[in-house]
Amino acid sequence: MYLQKRNRILRKSAAIRSLVAETVLTPNDFIAPLFIQEGHNEKTPIPSMPGYFRNSLDITVNEVKELYNLGIKSVLLFVKALDETKDNEGKEAWNPNGLMQRSIKAIKESVPEMFVMTDVALDPYSIYGHDGIVKDGEIVNDETVDALIKMSVSHAVAGADMVAPSDMMDGRIGAIREALEESGFTKTGIMSYSAKYASCFYGPFRDALDSAPGFGDKKTYQMNYANRIEAINETLQDVEEGADIVMVKPAMAYLDIIREVKNAVTVPVSAYHVSGEYAMIKAAAERGWLDENKAIIESLTSIKRAGADLIATYFAKQAVLLLNQ
């Protein structure tokens, strides 16, 4: 049999497959999300996220050191606020002595080279578990943006390299950018959760921070998962308003959106490999239904192949260890 072209020639060995691989994962691709709690030497397992923990700040600092030594250059911080600090305005979110602010300072003091990103949203601080201020059963936009401005500036004061608004309020990127400029934080970046969908895949995350909505859902401000063009519009608006990096969340069920966004913008694109996606792989692996290590690398490669320049993933540490083998 004569063939003019045999495509399998470029697949015949591991060496040639590596040489012609179009997508290659490296530690530089990953952002490691970290959950932080009050206390000392406290390590709380998250039942719906096997192998992941919510740690006190002292343990978190040691974890950040380890991550940096492995080659991971960025962490994304989330804190669990004490119940007694929660209200409807989220005032604890900009407390200069709050857990987030103390965490930023401690990490930057211990590992100054680590690029520290911080979550900006009110749900961890809200008695209602919503990303914004509630009035008459509605999550109000403009008052929430005012709170997010205070929160973002307080993170910048503490030393954050980049704030990451995950709330999906209208106009918050421009307002935060203006506030950072006016406050003299011209080097503080913004990674906007530009296309954040109202997804069922966030469940384990809400267990981690005890931030599930106390009523209703988040569909009035997070995006409808049926929509594609809306994601482009949201993202382009955030770029116009001053976002340095834009994000698609979740990742694995939204690979088409990652590609659409990548094609539409010239800023870096990040994607969040969310807690439910992590939990699915873990659960299937525990039952012996798939090979966990192979599933991790294949999943993360697919996200990068779709167009993500950066991937926030709970598998960051495990993935780097696998890549270094």
Image: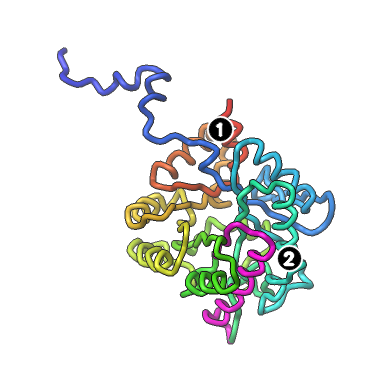
Q: Would you say residue 279 is visible in this rendering? A: no
Locate the N terminus by quadrant.
top left
Residue that mark 2 sits on: 81
Locate the C terminus by quadrant.
top right
Nearer to us in this view, 258 or 100: 100
The quadrant where residue 68 appears? top right
Q: Would you say residue 130 is visible in this rendering? A: yes
- Residue at screen point 71% across, 77% down: 87
The quadrant where residue 238 appears? bottom left
Q: Residue furthest bottom?
A: 136
Q: With respect to residue 207, does 307 lie above or below?
A: above
How many angstroms separate mark 2 from mark 1 (CA)? 33 Å
Nearer to us in this view, 33 or 211: 33
Which SS class for mark 1?
A: helix
Residue that mark 1 sits on: 293
- Residue at screen point 65% across, 74% down: 128
- Residue at screen point 67% across, 73% down: 126
Q: Identity of the amino acid at label 2?
A: Ala
- x and y percentages locating residue 243 in the rendered image: 46, 63
Decide which of tag 2 and tag 1 comes sooner along the chain.
2
> Which stretch appears magenta?
136-165
- x and y percentages locating residue 118 in the rendered image: 62, 59
Q: Identity of the amino acid at label 1?
A: Asn
Which SS class for mark 2?
A: loop
Q: Residue furthest top?
A: 1
State left or right for residue 298 relative to residue 22. right
- x and y percentages locating residue 254 in the rendered image: 42, 53
Q: Is residue 164 magenta?
A: yes
Q: Is residue 318 magenta?
A: no
Question: Tell me, what colour scheme is on the image?
Answer: rainbow
Nearer to us in this view, 147 or 287: 147
